[in-house]
Amino acid sequence: MISRLLRPLAWLLLAAIIFVTVSPIDLRPHTITTVDGDRALAYVVAGFVFAIAYPRQWKLVALFLIFGALAIESLQYLSPTRHARLHDVVVKAAGAALGILAGRAVYRRLQIRQRIKTVPAQG
C-alpha cells in the first residue's frame, strides 16, 4: 500500500533533480551543505523513495537511477552556464546506491514486521 502512495513522490523527486541539474546555474537552490552533499543527499532520498515505491523492481530502479545520473549530468552540455563532470556522476550514483540499499532495508524490515503481526500465535 505504501509503495503505491510513494510512486508519485518518487517521480516528482526525479523531476526536481532533473530541473536543478539542467536549469541555469542561477536557478540552483542554495543550501547550507556543500554542493557534493546536496548532490548525494538528493540521490539518497530519491533512491530511498524509489526503492520503497518499486520494491520488486529494485534492481531495475538501481540501474535506472545510477545510469540516469550519467544521462542527466550529460544534459548539462545543453546549458551554457553548466558543466558536466564525471566526479558529479560518481557522487550522484553513490548517493542513489546508498538510498536504494537503505530503502530496501527499511522495506524488508517492514515486511518482516507485517508477517510477524499476521502469523497466529501458537499455543
Image (cartoon, rainbow, N blue to C red):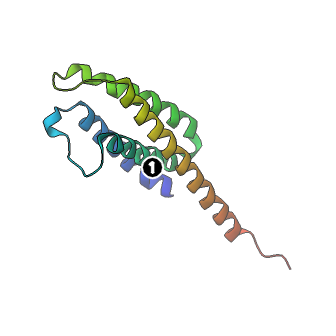
Furthest toward the left, the residue is 26
Residue 42 sits above or below residue 65 on the image: below
Residue 123 sits above or below residue 77 on the image: below
Furthest toward the bottom, the residue is 123
Res 114 quadrant in image? bottom right
Give coordinates of residue 54: x percent, y percent: 51, 45
Q: Quadrant of the C terminus?
A: bottom right
Between 45 and 31, which is closer to the camera in this rendering? 31
Mark 1 sits on what residue? 49
Give coordinates of residue 91: x percent, y percent: 41, 35
Give coordinates of residue 79: x percent, y percent: 19, 23
Residue 84 sits above or below residue 18 on the image: above
SS for tag 1?
helix
Q: How many marks?
A: 1
Furthest toward the top, the residue is 77
Left or right: 97 in relation to 117: left
Q: Residue at x 21, y 26 (%)?
A: 82
Q: Residue at x 43, y 55 (%)?
A: 5
- The amino acid pointed to by label 1 is Val
Between 59 and 102, which is closer to the camera in this rendering? 102
Give coordinates of residue 115: x percent, y percent: 69, 64
